[in-house]
Amino acid sequence: MRWQGQKLGETDAAALPGLEDRSSVLRSVTTPEFAGMTFHEVLSKSALNHVPGASRMPFAWTINPYRGCSHACLYCFARGTHEYLDLDGGADFDSQIVVKVNVVDVLEKELRKGSWQHETVALGTNTDPYQRAEGRYKLMPGIIEALAASGTPLSILTKGTLIRRDIPLLVKAAERVPVDVQMSIAMYDDELQKSIEPGAPTTQARLDTVRALADAGFRVTVFLMPIMPHMTDSVAAIDDALTRIKATGARTVIYGALHLRPGVKSWFFQWLEKARPDLVSSYRGLYPGASAEAPKAYRQWLAKRARPLIRMHGLDGRHEDDYPQRGVRPGQGHVESIWRQGAVQSTGRPSAPVTFRTTGSSSAPPAQPMLF
Ligand code: SF4
């Protein structure tokens, strides 16, 4: 949504700097219950976003009721999209949340159109639909009901424990249409999780939410991503994560290495320099220049390590580099890399740490040795 595409002929002189001439903004709200946050309530002209066929996403339609995300994950790829709104991709992304307050009304109209083909609609592809703002605005119940009533399958990816509020509604929706639920849980060290995802619910709270969803009958997928080189990629760390995931009743794990897109990288490196200065040169080697993906050699090494562990735990596993479903796939706005639907072929035992070489391109010949 570009602000200029949402004009409804209104202006808000009280809006924040940079938003004064954005006539879709109804008002900007701060409240004591959400200290440090501002909600910019806007009227959206559309609810359903069409994903181009050439996109890497395996679904054709998305809904994003919020822009910006209070979960504040350092690695979030959607940070760059906030700059598109003339807000910054750092602290503004975490605290200046755009709320499409009329999204349910607009959605209902769009779903009534004769041209609607009832293709699956994905929620949580860019920002989290169950972030803190949802506690105030309660947009998701209306979205779920509208999709189910129109016979439209839906898929939800979240880190938000607030989804528990809507479990009864999701159960009812699942009686009418396919409902796919996915929880993103990447960090299993509490200190690291709080540092990297400072606004997100704790790992245990998310695992408990997966349990509640599984108990309600959903086949929950856990996104074990991003896996952070040198921080969460040891055999012990992956094994611990999978043990805890398995205990929730989740069926499937999708895993992948950290991506650092432009707009995210500088933000992430600011954190790394303070929190893990010992890893800065390694990360500069892994993600040199404008490269967003870890080198292919690292991703392959990670897959060799993770696959047998996933099999050992009796989970279905998919690597982000496995083949796609619809052409190609989502990013951790919410999901950062290729969300592929292929079955994992697991062979061999976890490998020992190995040496990789990287250059400015993840696929180019190696130049600098990097030790993992
Ligand atoms: S990765 Fe997801 S949960 Fe984290 S800040 Fe981005 S949208 Fe929010």
Image (tube, helix red, strand yellow):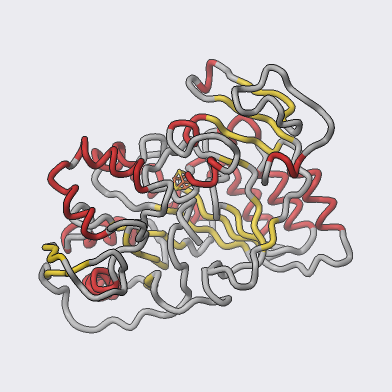
Q: Quadrant of residue 11?
A: top right
Q: Is residue 195 left or right of residue 355?
A: right
Up-down relation of residue 110 to residue 80 (above or below): below
Residue at image point 71% right, 31% down: 22
Q: Is residue 23 left or right of residue 139?
A: right
Residue at image point 49% right, 46% down: 80
Residue at image point 47% right, 67% down: 339
Q: Quadrant of residue 5?
A: top right
Residue 267 showing in the rendered view: yes
Residue 208 showing in the rendered view: no
Up-down relation of residue 203 to residue 290 (above or below): above
**Residue 223 x/y as whole percent:** 41, 59
**Residue 95 x/y as whole percent:** 50, 30
**Residue 225 x/y as whole percent:** 36, 58
Up-down relation of residue 306 to residue 16 (above or below): below
**Residue 108 x/y as whole percent:** 81, 50
- Between residues 65 and 168, which one lies in front from this camera angle? 65
Q: Is residue 259 left or right of residue 285?
A: right
* Quarter in which the C terminus is drawn: bottom left
Q: Is residue 120 left or right of residue 219?
A: right
